[in-house]
Amino acid sequence: MRWAISLPVAIVMLMALMLPGAVTPPALARPIRRHTLKPTPPKVPIDWDKLTQEASGLLANYIRINTTDPPGNELPAAKMLREKFLAEGIPATIWESSPGRAILAARLHGIGHHTKSIILLSHMDVVPANPREWQVPPFSGTLKNGEIWGRGALDDKGPAVVELMAMLAIKRMGVLLNRDVLFLATAGEEVGGAAGAGWVIDHKPELYSDAGYLLNEGGGIQIEKGRKLYTVSVTEKTPLWIRLTASGAPGHAAVPPARTSVTRLIAALDRLDTYRTQIRVINPVRDYFHELATLGDAPAQFNDLAKALRDDPAFARNFVESPSQNAQVRDTITPTVLGASDKTNTIPATAYAEVDCRLLPGSDSKEFLASIRKVINDKSIKSDVLLNFPPVSSPQKSLLMNAIRMVGHRFDQAPAVPRLLDGFTDSHYFRQKGIVAYGFIPLEIAPAEMHEVHGVNERIAVKNLQGGIERMVDLLEILGGREGS
Ligand SMILES: [Zn+2]
């Protein structure tokens, strides 16, 4: 297939070179739609403004279906998305992992039989929203000042609409990709993914067995110092959630023994609080900061972060003062839940704390737990693992990364940079199956908007929605066309 498509393109390019004054490529700021260069098949032009209106309406309706998790109740949302695909002639199926918890898959067939498909992943559930804190009702999907407001606008219903509308646009244009595109919308991501992505991995292997690539939340078009960066999460920190339980004799608080379950627990947490984990710079973090160093007024030390953190103590101190930077170079330990007596005058037999540890790829959970026990240095305190899974990374180099790079260059003259996501998403389920999974949806998100994710007044600009769809179409065409194989 490769030569059949690339040969005519080569001829077009050759002809362009022969024309006087045509040697310089046209300005890249505004994209030249590659569609015009692609010789086959003839395409139906898309009215992007109309498509964007349709996308806005779809997103508003999607937001109006309240999928707050718990309980999630994603089924009505899955049904709405299924209707949208079916109306377009794209086969779509729903499964229920448990009553009301739905997973939707829709497959846009390509013409390639030997090329791996790409999964466009999203989750239908959202985190709770308190209407009293919002400027508009959080499940209203209100259009205001050119923005669509509501819980899920950015996480993760807006990105899902970008994925879905890009597939519809490709179908309507009559473009035949050389690989399948699988839209997968899951349940329960916000509470760990067991009801959605985890269920798919365990119960529907035939769905993803032909998949080689996956795009998911976790990265996008970031604006740094006025310049755009396409940040692509190639890996994530892995959670190690533990419960520490201290025991002691229960009794009356009027006659306390020297040590109780509560004082033992406090001492343990205090030791953890003063414990400093090692600084370690993994490759995507090194490369990300190296890229930032090229953006004007970033510290020169970003050029070689590992060296600077090792050799420049003042810089290192300053660097880890920022919680987000600290999380990029360290395993973190964060006590979050505490429980003991519910009576002031009663000493409880047990007191417990839950601790949210996040490990860098390369850190070993067992070793980490052993080091925590050593720091706590109290054998009477029990530690149980509540949640953990092996850290998995996707390679930084791939056809998918090349495609992202090309879109970044064509639309925004922006570099694509790998990064480490400090949270975790459903991507790890698919990385474990050897699928190259990137946290990247080509949506422009301003730093201020990042705070709206899981926060109040979450919203997305309609123009960004349109930009996202156009870029996603281009990305899929590159991956499923001339440059893919
Ligand atoms: Zn999300």
Image: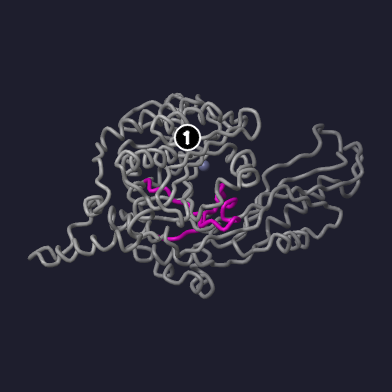
Query: With 317 as the anchor, is 28 left or right in this view?
Result: left
Q: Position of residue 451 (x, y in %)?
A: 46, 42
The residues colored magenta run 417-443
Quadrant of the image occupied by residue 458: top left
- Disc 1 residue type (three-letter): Gly
Query: With 408 as the anchor, is 201 left or right in this view?
Result: right
Quadrant of the image occupied by residue 256: top right
Identify whether 128 is placed above or below 7.
above
Query: With 166 as the anchor, is 362 left or right in this view?
Result: right
Q: Position of residue 179 (x, y in %)?
A: 42, 51
Query: With 24 as the anchor, is 307 left or right in this view?
Result: right
Identify the image's colour scheme: rainbow, by chain, secondary structure or one colour. one colour
Q: Which residue is mark 1?
A: 152
* Residue at position x 50%, y 28% in the image: 79
Mark 1: few/some/many CA within 10 Å (<14, 14-19, 20+): many
Q: Position of residue 428 (x, y in %)?
A: 58, 52
Asked whether 134 or 358 is in front, the reply is 358
* Residue at position x 77%, y 58% in the image: 376
Residue 432 painted magenta: yes
Identify whether 162 is placed above or below 3.
above
Asked whether 412 or 434 is in front, the reply is 434
Residue 318 painted magenta: no
Asked whether 482 or 245 is in front, the reply is 482
User: Is label 1 in a helix, a strand or a loop?
Assistant: loop
Asked whether 386 or 22 is in front, the reply is 22
Q: Position of residue 389 (x, y in %)?
A: 66, 53
Image quarter where the C terminus lies is bottom left
Image quarter where the N terminus lies is bottom left
* Residue at position x 45%, y 66% in the image: 287
* Residue at position x 62%, y 29% in the image: 71
